[in-house]
Image (cartoon, grey):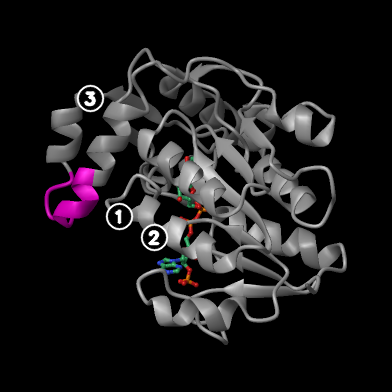
Amino acid sequence: MTNLTLVLGAGGKTGRRVARRLRDGGVAVRAGSRSGTPRFDWTDRATWAPALDGAGAVYISYFPDLAAPGAAETVGAFAGLAAPRRLVLLSGRGEPEAQRAERLVRDASPDATIVRCSWFAQNFSESFLAEPVAAGAVYFAADAVREPFVDVEDVADVAAAALPEPGHEGRLYELTGPRLLTFAEAVREIARATGREIGYTPVSVEDFTAAMDGEPEDVVALVTYLVTEVLDGRNERLADGVREALGREPRDFAEYAVTLR
Ligand SMILES: NC(=O)c1ccc[n+]([C@@H]2O[C@H](COP(=O)([O-])OP(=O)(O)OC[C@H]3O[C@@H](n4cnc5c(N)ncnc54)[C@H](OP(=O)(O)O)[C@@H]3O)[C@@H](O)[C@H]2O)c1
């Protein structure tokens, strides 16, 4: 096997950062992308083998989400084709479908490293909450529940260490930030760090999904599943994955918030 690493979702929140770190460390990277050469598309299995050809390791970030219908089977089938390469799977915490995907990947590749993450801090700036944050008014279906937001810079540090370095095989790293915050507190921290006024209003799941009127049905179903499954308090605890993988503390939400200035 070569040290060429295939990074899936190479233009995405984590993949972009993983690819940069690997390249900076002298690892050859193939960007897994629908516009790459060769092309990689989760929905077109014929693109999988050419993308894997010559690669010795793969960073697997699924799109849109491991909670999407069929995602676990798709990722499991991909892992079957990708084994025995070195595999690192990005996964979500407290999500039954994501945990099923982890099991299928491990069935195909027992040495795979699982990077199981809490809610990304960067959802406030690089995902569906970016627009409301920029507009100064966030309406979301989370009230008193607290989440240990993880910085995707930490996710990328862990994945980029686990891909080329020995010692991470077969490990499950559960990554969180070092602090539990409600969504209102997180938005307040962003407002304070950026000197902007940003309101946060908790709404019911029904009102939140109703406000998604016009979005495709599968997107509404996916978001409804995520806000009901993941934000019910099950994840209100810190985990040690960053320390276990890297021997240092995770970045605090405040460190992320100042990057938005
Ligand atoms: N957000 C969270 O809080 C959170 C927490 C825990 C786990 N996760 C997991 O994180 C994963 C997403 O990772 P991420 O946030 O780093 O990625 P992301 O930012 O959502 O990735 C977007 C990339 O996916 C690629 N893409 C879109 N459709 C594709 C397709 N059909 N085939 C191949 N690539 C496609 C696009 O690249 P091209 O246009 O170049 O193809 C795009 O750059 C999900 O599986 C989710 O379960 C998320």
Secondary structure type for disc 1: loop
User: Circle 1 is placed at which residue position?
Assistant: 70
Q: Magenta stretch?
A: 212-221
**Residue projecting furthest to the right:** 26
Secondary structure type for disc 3: loop
CA separation in Å, label 1 and label 3: 29 Å
The C terminus sits in image quarter? top right
CA separation in Å, label 2 and label 1: 6 Å
In this view, 183 is above or below 111: above
The amino acid beneath tag 2 is Thr
User: Circle 2 is placed at which residue position?
Assistant: 74
Side of 188 where 209 appears, left or right: left
Side of 99 where 224 appears, left or right: left
The amino acid beneath tag 3 is Val
User: Circle 3 is placed at which residue position?
Assistant: 203
Of residues 244 and 156, the one nearer the viewer is 244
Instruction: Point out residue 190 in the picture as x, y percentages from the top left corner.
Output: 54, 31
